């Protein structure tokens, strides 16, 4: 079971305290997954969802709010994932139009509405309930083990903006993107996803998300520290090998006795202790020298070795030229 499904199952068990909250949540579910049908001159509202817990919640909310019984049908998809679809069907005979008006589907003149009915979300608790219903109807959230991403998908641009605006009332920086014929309200920052789970009331999912996120960030931090230490160690080893090579070149050409006392002392210490750090080398000298002082002396030795190599290359070039002249004649 995916993390998104677990979150929805938890949200389906959250029940609003007041009737206004229940109405706001049902309105969101109907706006996300509902459709009006006319069959044999009989109008009906259907709410279609892939989540069984969400379908049960739609059924119970209709019964609690309006005292009506709805039909629940199960259909099997024949393509793609071949999962079940749960259809909650409400015949609209009698008080059907009044129910649609209260849910914000119809206006006072019986016309279909395009956006969110503001009367449904006047209170903070109702806004939370509406967002919960919107997520149940068309939301998903990635497992924190992967990339952080939460989204709510709707077919209406205006509704997407309404959802984005409601999330903004809680300080969430949601954005709207277009995906083919769909409009996606999404969050990508882990802190904001945690806040949104808290707003909807998915506290168990929030704790699971936070536990995985903290473990993941700690693991990444340890990996970064290990990589940094490894890089520094490799850099130190490479520098030490280069310094030993320079000192051996100087010793084999001009000799260490031709160096100043300070340079000779550092050169001998490096040859005897190739694995020592600059700080450790400085503590071996008499008198002791700081890290920057040791580094300065080693740079001087590198410059001397560089001049020896340059002179050797020049002499080699001249010698090669003399050897070639007789052949060229």
Image (tube, rainbow, N blue to C red):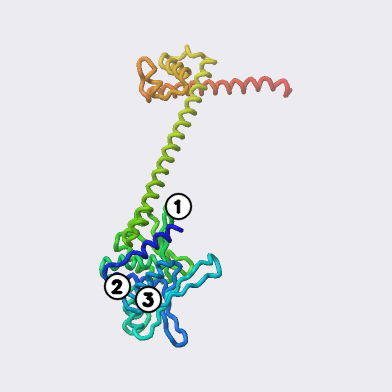
Asked whether 209 or 196 is in front, the reply is 209
Q: In which quarter of the view is residue 32 placed?
A: bottom left
Query: What's the distance in space between the residues labelled 2 and 3, CA to CA?
Result: 14 Å
Which one is nearer the viewer's eye here, 102 or 152? 102
Rounded to the nearest angstrom, the CA distance separating label 1 from label 3 is 36 Å
Mark sitting earlier along the chain (2/1): 2
Q: Position of residue 38 (x, y in %)?
A: 45, 84
The residue located at (44%, 51%) in the rendering is 145
To which quarter of the image does residue 142 belong?
Answer: bottom left
Q: Is residue 82 left or right of residue 224?
A: right
Separation of marks 2 and 1 at Cα, in angstroms: 35 Å
- Residue under circle 2? 120
The residue that mark 1 highlights is 146
Give x and y (percent) for residue 320: 65, 22
Q: Can you tell which of label 1 and label 3 is closer to the viewer?
A: 1
Query: Are circles 2 and 3 on residues that touch, CB within 8 Å?
Result: no
Check whether the beta carbons of the residues at disc 1 and disc 3 lie within 8 A of each other.
no
């Amino acid at each position: 079971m995916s993390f998104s499904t677990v979150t929805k199952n938890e949200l389906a068990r959250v029940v609003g305290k007041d009737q206004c909250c229940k109405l706001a949540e049902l309105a969101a579910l109907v706006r996300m997954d509902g459709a009006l049908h006319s069959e044999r001159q009989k109008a009906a509202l259907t709410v279609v969802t892939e989540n069984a817990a969400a379908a049960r919640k739609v059924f119970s909310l209709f019964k609690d709010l309006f005292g009506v019984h709805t039909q629940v049908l199960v259909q099997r998809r024949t393509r793609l994932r071949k999962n079940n679809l749960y259809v909650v069907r409400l015949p609209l005979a009698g008080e059907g139009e009044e129910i649609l008006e209260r849910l914000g589907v119809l206006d006072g003149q019986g016309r279909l509405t395009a956006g969110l009915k503001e009367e449904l979300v006047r209170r903070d608790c109702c806004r939370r309930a509406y967002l919960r219903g919107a997520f149940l109807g068309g939301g998903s959230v990635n497992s924190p083990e992967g990339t952080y991403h939460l989204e709510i998908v709707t077919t209406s641009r205006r509704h997407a903006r309404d959802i984005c605006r409601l999330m903004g009332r809680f300080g969430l920086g949601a954005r709207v993107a277009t995906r083919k014929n769909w409009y996606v309200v999404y969050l990508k920052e882990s802190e904001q996803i945690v806040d949104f789970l808290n707003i909807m009331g998915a506290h168990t999912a929030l704790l699971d998300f936070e536990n995985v996120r903290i473990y993941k960030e700690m693991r990444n931090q340890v990996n970064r520290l290990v990589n940094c230490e490894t890089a520094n160690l490799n850099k130190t080893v490479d520098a030490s090998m280069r310094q030993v090579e320079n000192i051996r070149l100087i010793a084999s050409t001009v000799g260490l006795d031709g160096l100043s006392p300070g340079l000779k002392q550092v050169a001998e210490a490096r040859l005897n202790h190739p694995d020592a750090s600059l700080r450790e080398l400085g503590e071996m000298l008499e008198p002791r020298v700081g890290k920057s002082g040791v580094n300065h002396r080693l740079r001087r030795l590198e410059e001397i070795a560089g001049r020896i190599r340059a002179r050797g290359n020049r002499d080699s070039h001249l010698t090669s030229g003399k050897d070639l002249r007789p052949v060229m004649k």
